[in-house]
Image: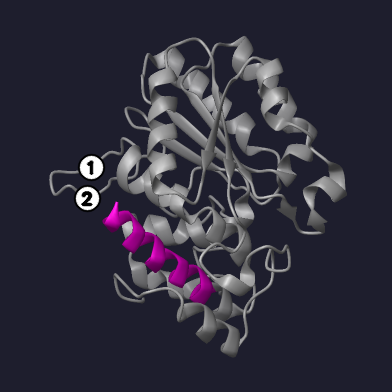
């Protein structure tokens, strides 16, 4: 658990420095979901590795767990976790949002960046792709899981609910959908922009097994992701309503939607980094 906390601290530093360096990006949601992605890639997911124990990226995703980021604006988080996990050199994080970089503002496939299987700039599409991947695993009798992370504001997209209908109908019990329930989106609180009401009850009514998790507590993450894996093969896809705090780890970025898509200035970066220990070495 201590190792995961150390990795999360470093990833949060990466996120802030990446967004600051190009004066563009989305730090709020990235910071809030950090603990989840660190847990997935460093503890929970079954990933392909070579003889040297280093991860090996295979676009097909066969015989391993797969992850799809639907809310692609939190790309700084995904890039940092992939780099720290060994998918590509950590030093490449310095190219974030630069011309000719493989690390675009939203993940893209044209750059062939290891770890990226879909372009996810437009919201609402990730669950459909993840459901297709889970269906493919079923057809190939591949028992590994498919994870998809979405935002709560993203639940306002109609395509999400088409996929939410598709998955239970096809008994995709190898699919784990995780909703980042931070209550914030670009224009303000989700309950004021377009209230999602009780998402758990909605997914339950659609035929999903619904779990609840504190996405900023490693004990809760470990317990609930373990339960989700136990539910695989039981006939129902799993939806995890994950409560997080946007801007988690930096006091002045929390409890507001202001940092959904705003970059810190020099003073703000220094103040933020002072709250996050450098544990693995900055890039």
Q: In the image, is 102 to the left or to the right of 7?
A: right
Q: Residue 105 got which mark?
A: none
Q: Is residue 49 above or below residue 261?
A: above
Q: Is residue 282 above or below residue 259?
A: below
Inspect the magenta stretch and tell me whether residue 11 lies in it.
yes
The front one of 136 and 10 is 10
Q: At 58% across and 11% down in the image, what residue appears? A: 170
Residue interval drawn in magenta: 1-18
Q: Is residue 27 above or below residue 87?
A: below
Residue 98 at x, y percent in the picture: 56, 74
Q: Is residue 166 visible?
A: yes
Query: Which of the image's four quarters has the C terminus?
Result: bottom left
Q: In the image, is 214 to the left or to the right of 229?
A: right
Tag 1 near tag 2, CB within 8 Å: yes
Residue 20 at x, y percent in the picture: 57, 79
Q: Secondary structure at mark 2?
A: loop
Q: Secondary structure at mark 1?
A: loop
Give the mark count: 2
Q: In the image as oriented, which residue stretches furthest toward the bottom?
A: 267
Would you name the residue on which mark 1 appears? 49
Inspect the magenta stretch and tell me whether residue 48 lies in it.
no
Q: Is residue 188 above or below residue 213?
A: below
Residue 249 at x, y percent in the picture: 51, 66
Would you name the residue on which mark 2 appears? 54
Residue 194 found in image quarter: top right
The front one of 41 and 200 is 200
Sort mark 1 into few (<14), some (14-19) or many (20+) by Cα contacts within 10 Å: few
Q: At 32% across and 55% down in the image, what residue appears? A: 4
């Amino acid at each position: 658990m201590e190792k995961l906390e150390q990795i999360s601290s470093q990833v949060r530093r990466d996120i802030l420095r990446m967004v600051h360096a190009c004066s563009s990006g989305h730090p709020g949601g990235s910071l809030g979901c950090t603990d989840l992605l660190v847990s997935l890639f460093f503890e929970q997911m079954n990933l392909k590795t070579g003889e040297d124990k280093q991860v090996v990226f295979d676009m097909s995703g066969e015989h391993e767990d797969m992850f799809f980021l639907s809310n692609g604006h939190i790309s700084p988080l995904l890039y940092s976790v992939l780099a720290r996990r060994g998918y590509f050199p950590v030093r490449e994080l310095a190219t974030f949002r630069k011309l000719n970089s493989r690390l675009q503002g939203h993940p893209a496939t044209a750059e062939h960046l290891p770890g990226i299987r879909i372009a996810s700039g437009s919201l609402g599409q990730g669950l459909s792709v993840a459901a297709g991947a889970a269906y493919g695993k079923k057809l190939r009798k591949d028992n590994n899981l498919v994870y998809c992370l979405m935002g709560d504001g993203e639940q306002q997209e109609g395509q999400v609910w088409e996929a939410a209908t598709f998955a239970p109908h096809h008994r995709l019990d190898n699919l784990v959908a995780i909703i980042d329930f931070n209550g914030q989106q670009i224009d303000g609180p989700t309950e004021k922009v377009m209230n999602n009401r009780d998402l758990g009850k909605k997914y339950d009514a659609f035929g999903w097994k619904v779990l609840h998790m504190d996405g900023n507590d490693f004990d809760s993450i470990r317990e609930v992701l373990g339960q989700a894996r136990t539910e695989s093969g039981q006939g129902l896809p799993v939806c995890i309503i994950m409560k997080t705090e946007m801007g988690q780890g930096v006091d002045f970025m929390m409890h507001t939607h202001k940092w959904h898509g705003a970059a810190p200035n020099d003073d703000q970066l220094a103040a933020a980094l002072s709250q996050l220990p450098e544990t693995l070495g900055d890039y």
